[in-house]
Amino acid sequence: MARKTKAETNETILKLMDIARRHFTEHGYADTVLEQIVLEANLTRGAVYHHFRSKKELFRSVLESVQREVAQRIEQDASTSEDVWEQLYLGCRAFVMAAIEDSSKRIMLIDGPAILGWNVWREMDETHSMSLLRGQLQLMQEQGYLKDASVDAMTHFLSGALNEASLWLAHAETRPNALEEAMRTLALFLEGIRRQE
């Protein structure tokens, strides 16, 4: 049997992750059955284990992919403005909107910390969304737009608030104005760290 090319291997991995993401989204980590993913991908169990040693490792790769997508959304939405304050607001809003989408909220907000542990989840968050937030706050501080405070502390405070707001919104289906309330509160919070001219 001929060996797969790198492109074919990458295609197989992406196919597995796509199918796994759908299963993790619809059923959650605990109720996702690896054999079902194998069957749907039309692969053998051994072929899957060649790429991912366990369901947990597959989940970690899917979560990493979700985190990258969210970071891309943040950059994309923030870049629609030239104003640094609007960039910060749009980036924060993009994070919340992406995090609460059906295709990411269960994986990113609920199962991610529970399955991989808080430390692993935070490392991923710091690598993606939080690093963008820190970079924007650093830029704003250098340009004199922020009140005198530690950028590191501000990053953690704001990141924590965004994560908690996203969790709240993910469970607020019965509260029709929740998103509007969260965005208004975000705007007020950001105004509070702005240096007044």
Image (tube, rainbow, N blue to C red):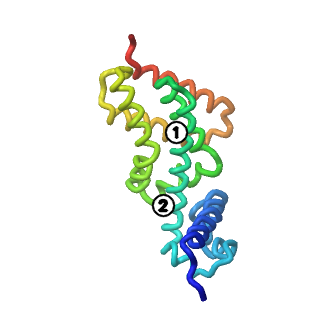
Pick the residue in front: 11 or 195: 11
Tag 1–tag 2 contact (CB < 8 Å): no
Which SS class for mark 1? Answer: helix
Q: Quadrant of residue 13?
A: bottom right
Callout 1: 10 Å neighbours few (<14), some, many (20+)?
Answer: some
Q: Residue at x 43, y 37 (%)?
A: 133
Q: Residue at x 59, y 64 (%)?
A: 14
**Which amino acid type is marked by label 2?**
Ile
Residue 162, image x, y percentages: 49, 37
x 55%, y 53%: residue: 66
The residue at the point 53 percent across, 77 percent down is 49
Crowding at dot 2, Cα within 10 Å, few <14 / some 14-19 / many 20+, comes out as some
Residue 33 lies in quadrant = bottom right
Quickly name the residue at label 1: 75
Secondary structure of residue under mark 2: helix
Q: CA distance from mark 1 to mark 2?
A: 28 Å
User: As rendered, which of 48 and 154 lies closer to the eye?
Assistant: 48
Identify the mark at residue 191; answer none if there is no mark. Answer: none
Q: Looking at the picture, which amino acid does disc 1 mark? A: Glu
Res. 115 mark: 2
Query: Split into 4 quadrants, where in the image is the N terminus?
Result: bottom right
Q: Earlier in the sequence, mark 1 or mark 2?
A: 1
List x then y, in percent, for residue 38.
64, 75
